[in-house]
Amino acid sequence: MPPDATTSTPAKIETPSSLNVSVLQTSERDYDSLFERVAWVYVFCREHLFRDDTKRIITALWPEGRPGPGTQLIELGCGPGFYSCRLAERFPDMLITGVDRSESQLRWARERAGALGLNNCRFRRINALELSYSDAEFDIVLASRLFTILPEQNRGIAEMYRVLKPRGRCFIAEPRYAFRASIPLFAMWLLAGLNRSQNGYREPYKATVFSRRAFENLFPTQPWKNIRIWQEGRYQYALCEKG
């Protein structure tokens, strides 16, 4: 949706406290995840170690300053809801959906949204590779650090493209340096080893980090109308527009 576009504002979506049923049922296998077993470690890293790209996201997506009323945004791999809640608080007329595979991370996200009194964001337990949403449902797709652990990046890009409306845009932020990007995984594996045997966890020991060329090559797998790639310090970014 263009920055100056306007639509009628739909009814408010359900509040975080009302979301008691996740899209996926939690099973014992789901807890074979570091993001479930030692969830607080990633939450700490997101709060205190990672770059806050809120201003970059807003500047890139809405150069004129704000989204139109009723803009629908989905954040993939939202974790503890850092960006979803920040954007929901900043733009109360926007409707935000945060999705993640980890129920523990989503619990943190819902608590954050509840503490802020937000009623324009919700959190769902959904795999970013199998989004349970219709084609062309969202105006904006947001993903930060998703590809560091996502096993099938091209499939993830295809899902992003699929759920975007025509003229919708996708903003992706990824770290550039493997050691620093892997700190959360290092820490979670260490604590998991201290608390229980290290077997069965699905996460890698080291984060996936792309060279500039490899990062650029992710996006032409879909027929984007426009693709912009740039680097700033320890991160690289992509802004893609669907035709």
Image (spheres, rainbow, N blue to C red):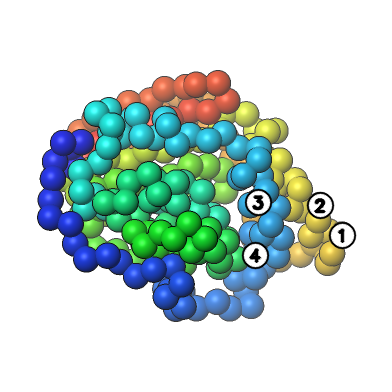
Residue drawn at (66%, 40%) of the image: 48
Residue type at the position of mark 2: Leu
Upstream in the sequence, badge 4 or badge 2? 4
Residue 213 placement (x, y as % from top left)? 46, 24
Q: Quadrant of the N terminus?
A: top left
**Disc 4 versus disc 2: distance between alpha carbons?**
14 Å
Residue drawn at (13%, 45%) of the image: 6
Marks 2,1: beta carbons within 8 A: yes
- Label 4: few (<14), some (14–19) or many (≥20) C-alpha neighbours in 10 Å: some
Figure quadrant of residue 202: bottom right
Q: Which mark is residue 36?
A: 4
The residue tagged 3 is: 42
The residue tagged 1 is: 194
Label 4 residue SS: helix
The residue tagged 2 is: 190
Residue type at the position of mark 3: Tyr
Question: Taking 123 as reference, is 170 left or right?
Answer: left
Along the viewing direction, whichever of 237 and 11 lies nearer the viewer: 11
Residue drawn at (48%, 57%) of the image: 116
Q: Quadrant of the C terminus?
A: top left
- Label 2: few (<14), some (14–19) or many (≥20) C-alpha neighbours in 10 Å: few
Residue 16 placement (x, y as % from top left)? 44, 67
- Label 3: few (<14), some (14–19) or many (≥20) C-alpha neighbours in 10 Å: many
